Amino acid sequence: MPNMLEVTTISDIESLRQFSAAIQKLGGKISHKTVKDFLHMRRIRWLSWFAAGVGYATAWLPNPFSVLLIAQHNIVDFMMGHHACHGAYNKISGVNTRRYRSDVFGKGWRRYRDWLTWWEPEWWMHAHNSCHHKHIQDPLDLDLISPETFKVVPKFFRYLAVAFYSCTWPFMYYAPYIQREFLRRGKSRSEAIAFKPLAHVFNFFDPIVRSLWLKQYLPVILIKFIALPSMFLVISPGAALTALATMLGAEIINNIQGFICHRSSHYGIDIPQFTNTVNGRTDYIVRQVVGSTNYKSFNDFTHVLHGYNMFHIEHHLWPSATMLQLKNYQPEVAKLCKQYGLPYHNELVFKRLKKSLDIYISGAQQPMMSTVALQAQH
């Protein structure tokens, strides 16, 4: 069968219709969530807090293990924020999941308990849930990073630029970016805004920048990098400084790990970008599959290390599915893709990272495609 994005014959379109119908039928099970889904999530959450407890308790002792334990706790916090904001745990039969509902998790004071990150959950839900999932790989996708961002500097310095970005992307790029997109939600637009790092992060004459720092950045800085390290002053000033270094190291490791796992899942010369917005249910489903990639992973421990992105295609098909459901449905999705001839990308994360870096640094191009042949399908 020819490339699914360049179908021209009725038989090809009919095949895609059948694939879409099969995916929708499989997705009909998503609403049935059981206590097993909740216990699976809670086990990950509790293990994360245990890792955090050990990591913070030993943060004043110079060692890499505290850094790694705290970093993995932060990864799980991101995972929980991600799935909770999609409504994955809004309603589970026989379980009170109120604190994990999308309208409760991380809201108001709970932000400091549930998901202490650099942005408001509402910004994330607009940028990620609405503008990324509904516009995957098209001009309105807010999660796309233009390769031109790094091409403005000579190739050697692109490595440094990508390295710096991987360490700092949540506060140097993503938070101010989605803040501005959230503020202009509802306005007509043909593409995402052009992000200007210096102006959007450090121009304190701009009231939007001042709000970003006062309401978002300062609480994180005060709690993570001042209050927590200061607790070790009871031991010694040196212990407090070591704790601060540990927490800064954990933040950097978390950012690098997040960059590798999240940013590599939509890039590569085998992953297309689309010149037009989605049109119809079949078009939408096909794009979620061909515009995303999974990572090979081998057990629950490595699932967490990947931020649960090893089921990224399934997550794009059913954003409100629980983590356990994504794991259980993955083999069936792979089987359907093979049956109907759609590409199903599932590779080691570092292989996907290499393909992403080829785009950012080496100038490789993602194919630009239009699914005009599917626009008749609704």
Image: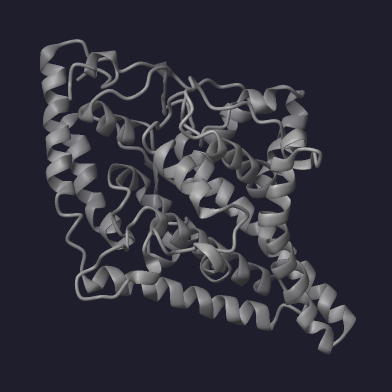
> Is residue 123 something that shows in the picture?
yes
- Looking at the image, residue 194 sits to the left or right of residue 239; the answer is left
Q: Residue 103's image quarter?
A: bottom left
List x then y, in percent, for residue 241. Answer: 84, 73
The single residue placed furthest to the right in the displayed view is 237
The single residue placed furthest to the bottom in the displayed view is 234
- Looking at the image, residue 269 sits to the left or right of residue 173; the answer is left
Image quadrant where one finds the C terminus = top left
- State the residue at coordinates (66%, 78%): 56
- State the residue at coordinates (51%, 37%): 143
List x then y, in percent, for residue 186. Answer: 46, 32
- State the residue at coordinates (61%, 65%): 71
**Colouring:** one colour
Using the image, determine if residue 276 lies above or below residue 336.
above
- Looking at the image, residue 269 sits to the left or right of residue 331; the answer is right
> Is residue 350 something that shows in the picture?
no
Using the image, determine if residue 9 lies above or below residue 279.
above
List x then y, in percent, for residue 210. Answer: 74, 47
Pick the residue in front: 111 or 376: 111
